[in-house]
Amino acid sequence: MTDLTTAKQMLGELISFPTISSDSNLDAIAYMAEVLGRAGARVEILRDDSGQKANLWATIGPQDRDGGLVFSGHSDVVPVQGQDWSRDPFDMYEHDGRLYGRGSCDMKGFIACVLAMAPRLAETVGDRPFHFAFTHDEEVGCLGGRALVEELAKRPVRPALALIGEPTLMQVVDGHKGCCEYTVRFTGTGGHGSSPEAGVNAVEYATRYIGKLMQLRAELKARAPEGSPFDPPHTTINIGALHGGTTHNVIPSAAMLDWEMRPINDADQAFVKDAVAQFIAAEILPEMRRLSPQADVVTEVVGEVCGLLPMPENQIRDMVQHLTGANGASVVPFNTEAGLFQQLGMQAIICGPGSIEQAHKPDEFIAIDQMAQCLDLIGKLAVHHG
């Protein structure tokens, strides 16, 4: 059986686990653990507080050595509800050189390739171990990845390199912006719309908050560093949703605002958060509480995931470019777990099979030749790194 045949079979198994972020991923993690265990890996299953989600951390090779290479992927997928699929999204099918199914490119195709190559990695491993990091809840704020790096930070042994297999058409990517998502809840006091000044209109204060965000969005354009590789070159702010009110003649007592920021550096993230906090404390809350002491503005951090910063020195980038013949590296607009590994002190890149254009869409697919390219790269890494 060829590596590609094995990888295709394993992808079918992985797709059959409906690991939507709202549901458990334990069956899929157990399957991955079994495959890696058969290859001789030492496997840890790290459950979250609910007990219904887990990360997998596994090692082939010496357990007590720094300098290892991490193959990283997330096990969860986005929902299929409301999408018009031609067939069952959790039953992989092949057609015209493509493998269809939810998660095929984002990113179970990469995980299948890594699992298929685990025996080869075990045969070639030397002093530097190979690690496997398969996480939960990447699609909803990188919750699993954040928990995993917190756990790894406590340990005395640190890997040196990380390859995150998000779909890049097997192109080398060494940078992306961060992703910070927030939900802000405004609590006021209701009343009849004929006397708007008698209540605290939560929607009105939410719109003033939005106005502040729009002011900051304009200021961020001027903060773009010279030579920024990103498009657009500056930190961005987006208003995702505003919910509040019931009808025309009622003062809304509650409102909820969802917004996100894509920072290019920590300084911009701090600039926005400090400005918003000061605006709430100095302007919005005093006005709201003048009429209603119970009025409040509460911010929930849905997720704050750091970006991946292009670095002059990056061994895994240079190694993969050499092995694939790539002329250089690029940056992407989407966010991944790569920055978390970089924060932990690893040199990291993104390089994986499939196109991000297929991710999250109905009839998601991965081209079989992309999986073949991925298997070839892992085989070369097995020799070059091992």
Image (cartoon, rainbow, N blue to C red):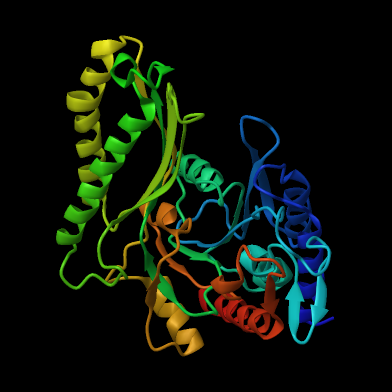
Q: Residue furthest top?
A: 293
In the shown orientation, is residue 15 left or right of residue 199?
A: right
Please state if 203 lies on the left or on the right of 374 as rendered: left
Q: Is residue 386 visible?
A: no
Res. 73 image quadrant: bottom right
Residue 110, image x and y in percent? 64, 69
**Above or below 99: residue 56:** above
Q: Nearer the viewer, residue 331 or 150?
A: 331
**Number of numbered discs visible in the structure rendering:** 0
Image quadrant holding the C terminus, namely bottom right
Q: Is residue 250 above or below residue 156?
A: above
* Residue at figure coordinates x 21%, y 48% from the top left: 216
Q: How far from the left and from the top, in percent, is residue 314? A: 35, 70
Above/below status of 363 relative to 36: below
How far from the left and from the top, in percent, is residue 266?
26, 50
Q: Which residue is rendered at x = 27% and y = 11% of the image?
A: 291
- Residue placed at 69% from the left, 66% from the top? 362
Left or right: where 312 falls relative to 354: left
Question: Which one is nearer the viewer's eye here, 28 or 313?
Answer: 28
Task: Name the quadrant containing residue 368.
Answer: bottom right
Q: Nearer the viewer, residue 91 or 117?
A: 91
Write the residue at 83% across / 73% down.
Answer: 93
Does residue 273 appear in this view?
Answer: yes
Please provide percent x and percent y for residue 1: 85, 81
- Image height of 127 relative to 7, above or below: above
